Amino acid sequence: MSPAARGTGRKQIHLAAHFPGVNNTTVWTDPRSGSQIDFASFVHLARTAERGKLDFFFLAEGLRLRELKGRIHDLDVVGRPESLTVLSALAAVTHRLGLAGTVNATFNEPYELARRLSTLDHLSGGRAAWNVVTTSDAFTGENFRRGGYLDRADRYERAAEFVRLSKLLWDSWQPDAVLGEQDEGRFVGADAIGAVEHRGAHFSVEGRFTLPRAPQGHPVIIQAGDSAEGREFAAAGADVIFTGHGSLEDGKRFYADVKGRLARYGREPHQLKIMPGVTFALGDTEEEAAEHAAAIRRSQVGPQTAIAFLEQVWGRDMSAHDPDGPLPDIEPDLSEGVSQGRVPVKDRAAVAAKWRALAEEKNLSIRELVIEVTGRQTFVGTPRTVARLIDQHVQADAADGFILVPHLTPGGLDDFVDRVVPLLQERGVFRADYTGATLREHLELG
Amino acid sequence: MTAEAGRTVHLAVALDGAGWHPAAWREPTAAPRALFSARYWAGLVAEAERGLLDFVTIEDALGLQSTLPDGLDERTDQVRGRFDAVLLAARLAPLTSRIGLVPTATTTHTEPFHVAIGIATLDHVSGGRAGWRPQISARSFEARHFGRRRLPPLDTVLNRPGGADLSAHPHVRDLFEEAGDVVEAARRLWDSWDDDAEIRDVATGRFIDRDRLHYTDFAGRFFSVRGPSITPRPPQGQPVVAALAHARLPYEFAAAHADVVFVTPGSAEQARAIVTEIRELSPHVQIFADLVVFLGDDAARRKARLDELDGAELSSDAAIFTGHVRDLAEQLLDWQGAGIQGFRLRPGALPYDLWQIASGLTAELRARQAFRSRYEADTLRGLLGLPRPAGRHAEAR
């Protein structure tokens, strides 16, 4: 059924839950903040997402602890599990929820990773998704045999070859290859396990795969990132694109651009779902929601975090400055960055100039400035307002849905599920219950 | 512990496919079409936990099963295909609460960092019940699944009694050295976070005390790992490492790197000789004997039927026991007298021989005060009587 073919004639919204990550979006200073590593926290978030009938649960990945000024960054949450292992455990305590793991294509081998993803799909009854990412830095490479790094074009070329080869492996067993005919003595059918032979620029693999076709055939492929290479990669073979375009106008431009690329690959618009990552703050009234949002922002940007943000742009030690005082009259050091293990700030000179102008114009302290210029919540308001905004974005073709990023572990999704989801269901734009068993069915990828 | 200390044995079960006989999937009680379902494995591990066993192991390899030493045999009359064992163990963790989960993970073609955080995560999701059986991959056909290194064809038959000694192959010596490096790197990564590294100090805005995180800086002939781990220290501190060993080279590997070694004696006398050899290498490693078992009143008839169906008499690296659980209990205690501390039983057919172990064998051993009547610990290290080690950096602080 096409999305618009339902009774309401309105596009159906897709929603996912991002486990709170290791940047300052996650507020660990709140008394309600629980463990970031105990399995119970993952179970709570995943079960809440499933109670809300969300499409999938999403785990990010970072394979090297982040550093600032040559030392491990200690102001944000640090530490997380191996994605696919914790998702496999979650498959035992959820029944319909999709399970999406971010796994690096730069520091893995296709035969092994395709096998792990197929295992997750089998063990979850068809709920696995792979968010394909690549790594840009030799810094992360220091944890791996391969080490080193690839430039941007090579990274995406390798990732694309990685996914193509994975699909060959996933398809290599014929459907119904496992017969299990005890009397005839046929466990698998003759020639049911096909040979794979691949010679490419990045991989050279020959042999047979070790698993029957998975329930979804291929796990759902997610691509994260907004670059031209990333968009093309997504258009060629991804099922979901996880972007940062939360605003209506940005979203519409991005949506039109990416959907417009699909025809070249013989694909229909509904075969690639566009899901920006978004934050939210709720309140009983608009004023209360705005106050709640401001309070979250202050928690997300504590005094030390404000200085750390400044240092990433200025490229020098700023720890002697008072975060509640004015921006010091110092020029950025543009020679080299001070931050490792995260996406670098582009064009630091321009960013610094913009920040300075804003601080002067509004007479902001360092901390107030950083609160102003970083990570404002996407959706702020009463549950009714937030439901309306989400629906508006989707109906206006700025998105097919959203990946919700709560600021608290493990309870950060509770209010959204209890208060916003029912309103979306009332509007007829979000499922009242799961109608399919697999994530592909939830996402209507048909 | 309710049973008399010193006389009790540890019991583990090795899970693989439909059991260890190649025709096991043709037993009337087998469920061959369910082998690739979570439900099948959940049933097996629940049965093992009902029997109060110490742990289950889960076999794995980075290639299809084969009767040939190296390369595929194209047989369609035996089980082919396997899940990734670490993910399967994780899938079973929330369904169990006491039993240890020991998946195999290959050291040859994998990334040491990924394996280390995978096992650490298994320990977190199971509340301290994770183990790991590191295994080398010496087969050239598996190397071709990766295309990164060329290995010479392996022509040694592995499933002969007692197991094969591969150390004559120069490349195998390298693979064992690399495996030792992989375990060492993993152990350093598990210790790279002190237990109290997470401080959540609101006044200074610090989530962790970075002085309690440590670079691993492992550098060897084959790879290097900078660290620290991305995963906090596992609940057990160090998950249990177990190794299967048939000869001097793997004995040395196990003595240097493992907490538990699985050996394959054919008799009490051989068991005594193996124990003597390993004890010279390590006073600490726990020595388990592997046995393939066909149990019950009609065990011999069942095994004979499976041999006939497979077209060959079962051949194994481990000794094969066929008979009543009462006699198996006597044999285990006899081998215990030779210095064997525990047993990893490989059920000839699943689930039938596992039922026999979990209810029959454990009852026979219990009647001889040689097995627990309840779980006395909630971590795998606890069940094995291993203390929880302090982190290697914590003491230096």
Image (cartoon, rainbow, N blue to C red):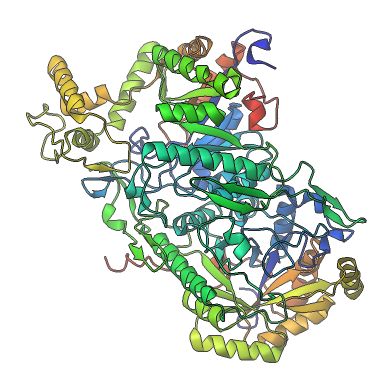
Is residue A154 shown above or below A141?
Answer: above
Question: Where in the figure is residue B322, as x and y percent of width and height?
Answer: 83, 77
Q: Residue at 12% of width from left, 34% of height from top? A: A322
Q: Residue furthest left?
A: A329
Q: Is residue A92 visible?
A: no
Q: Nearer the viewer, residue A77 or B3?
A: A77
Is residue B214 shown above or below A400?
Answer: below
Question: Where in the figure is residue A367, as x and y percent of width and height?
Answer: 20, 28
Q: Residue at 66% of width from left, 74% of height from top? A: B155
Q: Nearer the viewer, residue B348 or A432?
A: B348
Q: Is residue A362 visible?
A: yes
Residue A406, quarter of the rendered image = top left
Where is the C terminus of chain A found, in terms of image quarters?
A: top right
Residue B203, quarter of the rendered image = top left
Residue A216 lies left or right of residue B147; in this view the side is right
Question: Where in the figure is residue B108, as x and y percent of width and height?
Answer: 52, 63
